[in-house]
Amino acid sequence: MGVLDAVTERVAGRSDSVSLHECRDCGVILESAGPVCPTCGSTEIAYYEW
Ligand SMILES: [Zn+2]
């Protein structure tokens, strides 16, 4: 699970809250997301915050 590894590493490296967006269609992680995925053009963007 490369995506999960990347998320875990990102969270562990920061002490404040972390938020990110993930495209539900292509799975790309977007650190500062607009309403549309820049990779595939999907508007199905999931939002996560810790
Ligand atoms: Zn996408």
Image (cartoon, grey):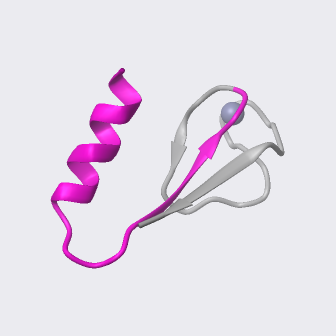
- State which quarter of the image contains the N terminus: top left
Q: Position of residue 3 (x, y in %)?
A: 40, 31
- State which quarter of the image contains the C terminus: bottom left
Q: Residue furthest bottom?
A: 16
Residue at 69%, 35% in the rendered image = 24
Residue at 21%, 46% in the rendered image = 9
Q: Residue furthest top?
A: 1
- Magenta residues span 1-25
Decide whether residue 17 is among the magenta residues.
yes
Q: Position of residue 7 (x, y in %)?
A: 34, 45
Answer with the quarter of the image where residue 12 lies: bottom left
Q: Is residue 31 left or right of residue 36?
A: left
Q: Is residue 18 left or right of residue 48?
A: left
Query: Relative to the observer, which residue lies in front, 47 or 38?
Result: 47
Answer with the quarter of the image where residue 5 lies: top left
Q: Position of residue 37 (x, y in %)?
A: 71, 43
Image height check: is 10 above or below 19? above
Decide whether residue 33 is among the magenta residues.
no
Q: Position of residue 10 (x, y in %)?
A: 26, 53
Q: Is residue 42 left or right of residue 1?
A: right
For ligand 1, give the image quadrant.
top right
Residue at 68%, 42% in the rendered image = 38
Image height check: is 33 above or below 17? above
